[in-house]
Amino acid sequence: MVSGGPYGLEDIIGMAGYGRALLILCLVPLFWSLPTSLMVGELASAIPAEGGFYVWVYRALGRFWGFQEAWLSLAASVFDMAIYPTTFVLYLSRVAPVLTSGHRGLALKLAIVLIATLWNLRGAASVGEGSWKLMCLTLSPFVVLIAIALWKTLHGGVHLAGSGITSRDLGGAISVAMWNYMGWDNASTIAQEVDHPQRNYPRAMLIAALVVMAIYTIPLSAMWAVGIPADRFSTGAWADAASLLAGPALAIAVVLAGSLDGLGTFNALTLTLTRLPAALSEDGMLPHLLKKRLRNGVPWVSVIACAIGWALALGLTFERLISIDLVLYGASLLLEFAALIVLRLREPDLPRPFRVPGGTAMVCLISLGPTALIAFAMYAARDEKLAGIPALLFAALVALAGSLCYLLTKWLGKAPAANPTSP
């Protein structure tokens, strides 16, 4: 749900160069991933309810803000989920451009959406087991690539000239790093389908934060050591690096693994995000049809509705997707930190199997890092445009539409359900 491997890091290298990219990948998780994983660890262990972060905000801030949290997350997902089929096509185009040109590229993206939809209808256990297997497959070419890079480094191989970059975009590099490190809270929405969530969520969050950092920094360090120029890196360039170091066979393996990475991440996020409309339906804020489930517990109407929404954004570019995604996701993340602080003050006696260490003051302090990075991402995206208007304005309009949708649900007479998260 956070990372399927080093895929997506290439733009950070190309925008910032190796040294700065490595520094960014080491510092961003300290102010972004670690605070978020601590927040998720406390709230998921204290309130392990289906709907996750939506439930936390609903309980802490009320029905209106709970709806806004769900709206922002689902709106962000429209742009986030389109990234993974997009990167799949970008990787495949490196070795088989004829398969991705024109309408074929869109057909491949739609195929990813369809496969993940059908897979999710089989249930959470199927998705979880498949994600583990796909992770092993997607990382396997990088084990070979890193080993070859280290061997060549020790024996004086490669070291190409001109390893610098002609123009730097540190703002863009940081934004891409934030995207690569986000998604920790998505795991919270399936708490009722997880064994012993009070014990397993904090453990998973903290261990995974360290593992993801290693998965990102080790391949980058290996490419830097072997001397592949940083200016050769853009989305899909891992295949080029593999071809340069080991030939076309490894390049093809990287491309195939990259396609599996896009499918695996899309599949895992489908599992978590489709629980939000079902939870809203249970609380009377969306049509009852969305809470219909199969015998295995899958909210099948919600799965299909979300898949259709995600398919509509498949034509957007990688950079524009990230800009809008970060703004909308960032707003929802700030609401989650607000819920963490409010629940500490309002419900000090709420059983918390895991607590952010250091008291309420520390809870407020750790929220400053994500807040500052979200503000920076908004500043960095100030020149991005979508449909002829600034991307930030577009994201703001999408966010404001959540208030109108909430009013619409009240006007249609949706009676507020009893808050299932009340103490």
Image (cartoon, grey):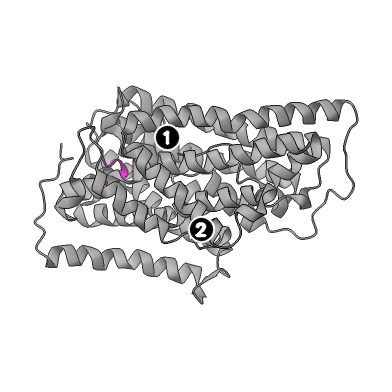
Task: Answer whether residue 377 is visible to the viewer in this image.
Answer: no
Which of 207/267 is in front?
267
Quarter of the picture containing the C terminus is top left
Residue 266: mark = none
SS at mark 2?
helix
The region drawn magenta spans 50-54
User: Is residue 221 rendered to the left or right of residue 9?
Assistant: right
Relative to 72, is 224 above or below? above
Mark 2 = which residue? 106
Examine the rendering and report whether any part of residue 82 can be seen: yes
Q: Earlier in the sequence, mark 1 or mark 2?
A: 1
Instruction: Give residue 321's position: percent from left, percent from top.
Output: 51, 59
**Is residue 351 or residue 249 the one in the foreground?**
249
Please name the residue shown 19% across and 66% down the image.
407
> Where does residue 69 sit, x and y in percent of width and height?
31, 53
Amino acid type, label 1: Leu
Residue at horizontal 17 percent and vertical 62 percent from the top: 409
State the image quarter where residue 198 is shown. Answer: top left
The reply, left or right, for residue 2 in relation to residue 198 is: right
Amino acid type, callout 2: Leu
Q: Which mark is residue 38?
A: 1
Whether the magenta-drawn stretch holds residue 394 is answered as no
CA distance for labels 1 and 2: 38 Å
Numbered circles on residues, count: 2
Q: Secondary structure at mark 1?
A: helix
The location of residue 275, given as percent across then percent down, is 28, 43
Q: Is residue 52 magenta?
A: yes
1 and 2 marks in contact (CB < 8 Å): no
Of discs 1 and 2, which sits in the foreground? 2
Q: Residue furthest bottom?
A: 388
Q: Position of residue 76 (x, y in %)?
A: 41, 56
Which residue: 19% across, 55% down?
286
